[in-house]
Image (tube, helix red, strand yellow):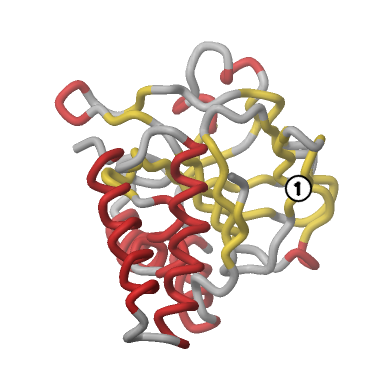
Amino acid sequence: MLLTIPDILDQTQLNRVHELLQNAHFVDGRLSAGKSARKVKRNHELASDSKLHNQLNNIVMNALFNHPLYQAAVLPHRLATPFYARYEPGETYGQHVDDPIMGPLQGRYRTDVSTTIFLSDPNDYKGGETVIQTQTGEQKIKLAAGSAVTYPSGSLHYVAEVTQGTRLVAVTWAQSLIRDAEKRELLFNLHKTRESLQQKYPDDPEVVKIDHTYINLMRMWAEI
């Protein structure tokens, strides 16, 4: 399921993120890429040893993890430390599929859902769309600063070449409580229906049954 989530970061948070990244040390993005991705990756990323990571994560990742739409759609079990990536003119990330397993030996996780959080205003750069292959064809995503797109990590995708300006994003991955993408989508749709009916008919016994069904499907399908 491809899902866009608006307004994860507000303007005050975005201003602080840009302030932190303005003079940050960025390194060749290929240093973090797997063997296949390294061949098609041309960008720069915040150095892994940068002391800015904790400050940035306290803003960006806390906002993402606590967003109710992200929680409902992704059902995150483990979240990866994000990469803060910068794309300048001529830089791109060719077609690839995200690695299925990431993290250090003592903290590995399965990548079920990928998330790109857009940090730059779309008017500040040209090109740079996140392009995701879906069953209905390519979906080109270029969102307002502070918004995010989530999609299955097994999707073929790429970042179109930036031709002008600077594109800043945060990219992270989640291991979901629900491994199967189709089951996650069913639960998400059921969740939205449940939420709507609970607001309109909080005491209706049929609505209570829907709530119980959602809870027990989670119990049946969850992997911890």
Q: Residues within 10 Å of mark 1 (few under 14, many from 20)?
A: some
Q: Amino acid at mark 1?
A: Glu
Q: Quadrant of the N terminus?
A: top right
Q: Nearer the viewer, residue 161 or 157?
A: 157
Residue 71, located in which quarter of the rendered image?
A: bottom left
Q: Tell me the SS state at disc 1.
A: loop
Residue 109, percent across and down?
29, 30
Write the residue at 67% across / 21% down: 40
- The vertical placement of 85 against 190, above or below, is above
Query: Which residue carries the number 1 mark?
Result: 129
Give the answer, above or below, for where 16 lies relative to 210: below
**Place of residue 27 in the rendered image (x, y in percent of width and height, measured from the top left):** 49, 37
User: Residue at image x 34%, y 68%?
Assistant: 66
Decide: is 174 above or below 65. Answer: above
> Residue 187: x and y, percent?
44, 52
Query: In this rendering, would 42 be left or right of 48?
Result: right
Instruction: Residue 124: name its quadrant.
Output: bottom right
Left/right placement of residue 55 relative to residue 224 reads right
| Residue 132 x, y percent position in the rendering | 70, 38
- Closest to the observer, 71 or 46: 71
Query: In the visual, does 178 lie left or right of 121?
Result: left
Give the quarter of the figure containing the C terminus: top left
